[in-house]
Amino acid sequence: MCGRFTLKQTAAALAQAFELETVPDLAAQYNIAPTQMIATVLHKPESDRREFQQLRWGLIPSWSKDPSIGAKLINARAETVAEKPSFRSAFKRRRCLVLADGFFEWQKKQNKKQPFYFRLQNEKPFAFAGLWEKWQSASGEEIASCTILTTAANELLEPIHDRMPVILAPEDYNQWLDPQLESPEVLEPLLRPYPAASMTSYPVSTLVNKPQHNSPDCVVPINDNNT
């Protein structure tokens, strides 16, 4: 699964990487956790352009009576996303890019879990494959939310965890965002493990275990014999 990630890039770097006209100034985030607002890119049909938008992490299906279900739907498995009732509508029509520059995964070691940080070797920002929904309560309250797709781990992740978030190749962004594409046969090939050779990882402090810790210390390498 993907339960924590980072986004430390400047607005200018994000605008360039994702071909956006405007990106607000964002505080560096070293420990993004579920239910927080996260940076995404959506395709806007009215302008036929990409647009930056902040969504709540944890997808709330439009038919749900209780928005708390979102905390359980932070990830969607690529292998079943086209059939699952919570995700199939969004998979067809409401896909997004979730902006990141690294993520965390935990390795079980005896009676504890050791966090590891994963990023691209070039340290550039990248996009997770995401889905989004707009939910409305009986009283008219609206919440726009999203989820991150996961797939089988690549060779770098395998010793740590058997799943990883889907990192899209930049050349696939337009296809993933295209609202005219609804066929699983076209979309599912994009949901593959990212090449391990383009990534790197290292153990980090267990500070990241608590969402209130949001500092550069969360991504500082440590000796994996210590926490």
Image: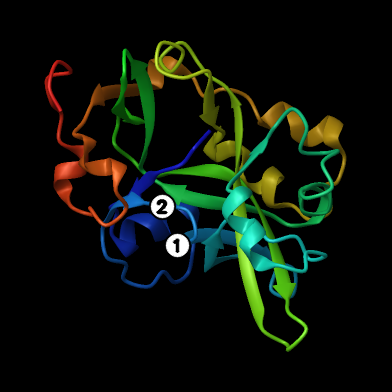
**Dot 1, how many residues are within 10 Å of its Cα: few (below 14), some (14-19), or many (20+)?**
few
Q: Is residue 212 above or below residue 172?
A: below
Label 2 amino acid?
A: Ala
On the rendered structure, is 78 left or right of 2? right
Residue nearest the viewer, comparing 21 with 37: 37
Question: Element under label 2?
Answer: loop
Q: Is residue 222 above or below residue 104?
A: above
Q: Quadrant of residue 132?
A: bottom right
Residue drawn at point x = 29 percent, y = 36 percent = 123
Residue nearest the viewer, comparing 117 with 53: 117
Q: Which residue is mark 2?
A: 33
Q: Quadrant of residue 156?
A: top left
Q: Position of residue 154 (x, y in %)?
A: 50, 16
Question: Element under label 1?
Answer: loop
Q: Position of residue 104 (x, y in %)?
A: 36, 35
Residue drawn at point x = 27 percent, y = 42 percent = 208
**Quarter of the C terminus within the rendering:** top left
Label 1 amino acid?
A: Gln
Report if residue 49 is visible in the image: no
Q: Is residue 139 above or below residue 173?
A: below
Residue lying at the far front in this picture: please name it.
Answer: 111
Q: Is residue 56 above or below residue 201?
A: below
**Dot 2, how many residues are within 10 Å of its Cα: few (below 14), some (14-19), or many (20+)?**
many
Q: Which mark is residue 36?
A: 1
Q: Which mark is residue 221?
A: none
Whether pointer 2 and pointer 1 mark residues with C-beta atoms closer than 8 Å, the reply is yes
Residue nearest the viewer, comparing 17 with 203: 203
**Alpha carbon distance from label 2 to label 1:** 6 Å
Report if residue 4 is visible in the image: yes
Q: Position of residue 50 (x, y in %)?
A: 59, 63
